[in-house]
Amino acid sequence: MTLDEAREILEAEVIVGSDLQDIVVEMGCGADLMSDVLAFVKRGALLLTGLTNPQVVRTGEMADIVGICFVRGKRPPQETIDLARENDLPLLTTELAMFESCGRLYRDGLRGCSERTG
Amino acid sequence: MSPGAKITKTQEMVYEMKVGDVMTTDVITVQAKDRMSSLRDVFRENRISGLPVLDGERLVGLISLEDFIKWLADKQDDCPVRQKMIEEVAYAYQDEPLVLAISSFEESGVGRFPVVDSDTGRLVGILTKGDVIEGLLKKLEIDYQNEEIRSYRTDHLFTDLEADETTLTFQYLVKGHDLKQAGTSSSRLKRTLNRLGIHPDVVRRVVIASYEAEMNLVIFTEGGKIRARIQPGEVLVQVEDSGPGIADVDKALEPGYSTAPDWVRELGFGAGMGLVNIRKCADSFDIWSKPGRGTVLKATFFTEEDKNETGRSCKYTRSGSDIGPGKPQQRGDRRLCKRSA
């Protein structure tokens, strides 16, 4: 699905990013542990997280993820937003909790990182 | 690139790509209960020669311009489309490899396939030979551009430089406890490797490892250095600091073992996965540490994907011991690991 479709499913607001319909989300990942993201997430994932510090963006940059969505209505601090802009990494925020966010995306066909090979 | 290689590339693409990647999603359809007379405008306005017939969202048949002309010529009653459509429709699944659809085109002589979702049976698009060609050309263009950028960059650095062997070294200084800057060095390394045209999958492995190591420097030490040495065939990353050192390297390599304080965990790190991740990303991995003296970590990443196992061990022996301060294998606690392929 595209990042814009994911945004719609999550009823999320865009904090950073444009042309979300041109960005393909290959898989989803929900994590608050950045080391887990670095270890298990594959290229092209959308990351759902409750953490908002700049290291989340750094992690996204290193792991080649295509977007980050903060759950439970969390808003990132300005330094996180600045870093995301610099790296051209879209940031979204949804009022939904982590479980519900993951559930909705999975229901609508987005698969997890372990189900995608290669 | 030889013509032979190009054909192989296209063959590879038709196996990799799915019908859903190239199909037209904006499909003009008619309902089975619609009258035949309503087709005239649809055919004329859209200049198409065939229409999928739906019952609700489900595909139930196909009606062609030919069927419509025959109906007109025979001056038959204005019946529902259902009575004149072809019910036995060849269709393609959205998630089937393109290669299957291409052979179906050849075998059946049909000009178009409606595309249905394999789970729901819902019509999701239509596939013509034109879509296949356009889809392949687009993909080729993207691949070609990427390839061109890659070879251009690599050429400049490794082929155009006159030497028997070329090695580039980049060094990044990491400040301890400076959370704001944490990750900057790995980010800069990533941009550098991308500019050098290193394969994105290799870049990803290198920078995930270097980022984990950088976080360790920021969290546990007063600062240190990340050095990346790039030469044809491999990237070697060496990360070193001068304290406090790891008391038990064996333990530190166990997944989940951590001595990180709470503020680190609040950042999403310190779960005892850092060294484990680095080892997982690297083709070979070597760590030396002594309390009070510091830690030296070396990770090697092969940049050519087709190295066989023998090739790997040879490379390892050559590159494993020729850089870095002192002779780590003689002092301190050292662990040498290889990545399982």
Image (cartoon, coloured by chain):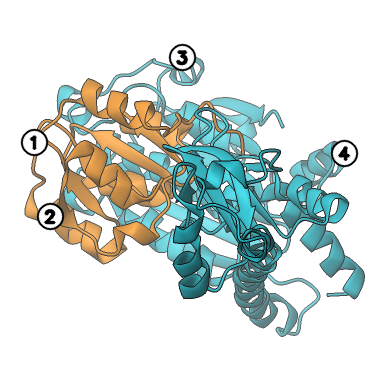
Chain colours: A orange, B cyan
| Residues at marks 4 and 3, CA–CA distance in whole angstroms | 30 Å
Image quarter where the C terminus of chain A lies is top right
Image position of B264 (left or right of B80) = left
Left or right: B77 as drawn, with respect to B65: left
Q: Which mark is nearer the camera, 2 or 3? A: 2
Residue B67: x %, y % from top left: 67, 57
Same chain for labels 2 and 1? Say yes or no.
yes
- Look at the numbered discs 4 and 2 and tell me whether their residues touch, using CB distance below 8 Å: no
Discs 4/2, front:
2
> Chain under label 1?
A
Q: Chain of mark 3?
A: B
- Do dots 1 and 3 share one subunit? no
**Residue type, label 1:** Gly
* Amino acid under disc 3: Lys
Distance between the alpha carbons at the discs numbered 1 and 3: 39 Å
Tell me the SS state at disc 2.
helix
Callout 1 touching callout 3 (CB < 8 Å): no
Q: Which mark is residue B310?
A: 4
Task: Report the front residue among B284 and B174.
Answer: B284
The vertical placement of B23 against B163, above or below, is above
Q: Amino acid at mark 2?
A: Glu
